[in-house]
């Protein structure tokens, strides 16, 4: 139980934090640097991908289970879907908007975090 808490609590708290910041009507202001918004998305979701990979890597293996599926594909898919979900949620938040390039940056960041 302690082991599960140690690996799963960080990813769940991080996802909650990203969600709360992402759906706040007054987002934090980023420096006026070219594509800083996309870099922030990429970095935030790279951390999330890393945390997902860490949590899933800690889980004991199941008979016949693909290690590639659990250690790479699943964390990337979960992170990318969460990023897309956040973008859809932002369509309904005053002062926010959904952008396909943000969703792409989220997915690419998640992938990079997993393969690190």
Image (cartoon, grey):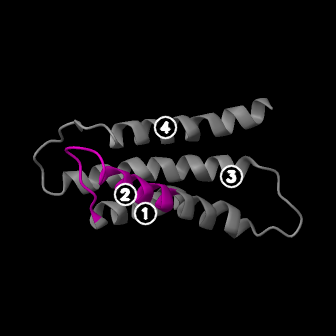
Q: Position of residue 97 (x, y in %)?
A: 24, 54
What residue do we see at 49% from left, 48% from top?
48
**Mark earlier in primary sequence (4, 1):** 4
Please provide the residue range marked out in magenta. 79-99
**Mark earlier in primary sequence (3, 4):** 4
Q: Secondary structure at mark 2?
A: helix
Q: Secondary structure at mark 3?
A: helix
How packed mark 1 is, by other alpha carbons closer than 10 Å (few <14, some 14-19, many 20 or more), is: many
Q: CA distance from mark 3 to mark 4?
A: 18 Å
Q: Position of residue 103 (x, y in %)?
A: 36, 62
The quadrant the N terminus occupies is top right
Left or right: 43 as drawn, with respect to 27: right
Left or right: 22 as drawn, with respect to 12: left
Q: CA distance from mark 3 to mark 2?
A: 26 Å
Q: Which residue is mark 4?
A: 16
**Mark earlier in primary sequence (2, 4):** 4
Q: CA distance from mark 4 to mark 1?
A: 17 Å
């Amino acid at each position: 139980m302690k082991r599960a808490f140690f690996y799963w609590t960080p990813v769940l708290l991080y996802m909650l934090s990203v969600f709360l910041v992402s759906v706040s009507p007054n987002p934090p202001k980023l420096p006026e640097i070219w594509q800083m918004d996309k870099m922030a998305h990429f970095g935030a979701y790279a951390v999330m991908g890393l945390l997902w990979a860490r949590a899933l890597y800690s889980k004991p293996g199941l008979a016949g289970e693909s290690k590639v599926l659990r250690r790479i594909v699943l964390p990337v898919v979960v992170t990318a879907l969460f990023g897309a979900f956040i973008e859809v949620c932002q369509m309904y938040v005053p002062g926010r908007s959904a952008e396909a390039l943000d969703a792409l940056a989220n997915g690419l960041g998640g992938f990079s975090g997993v393969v690190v």
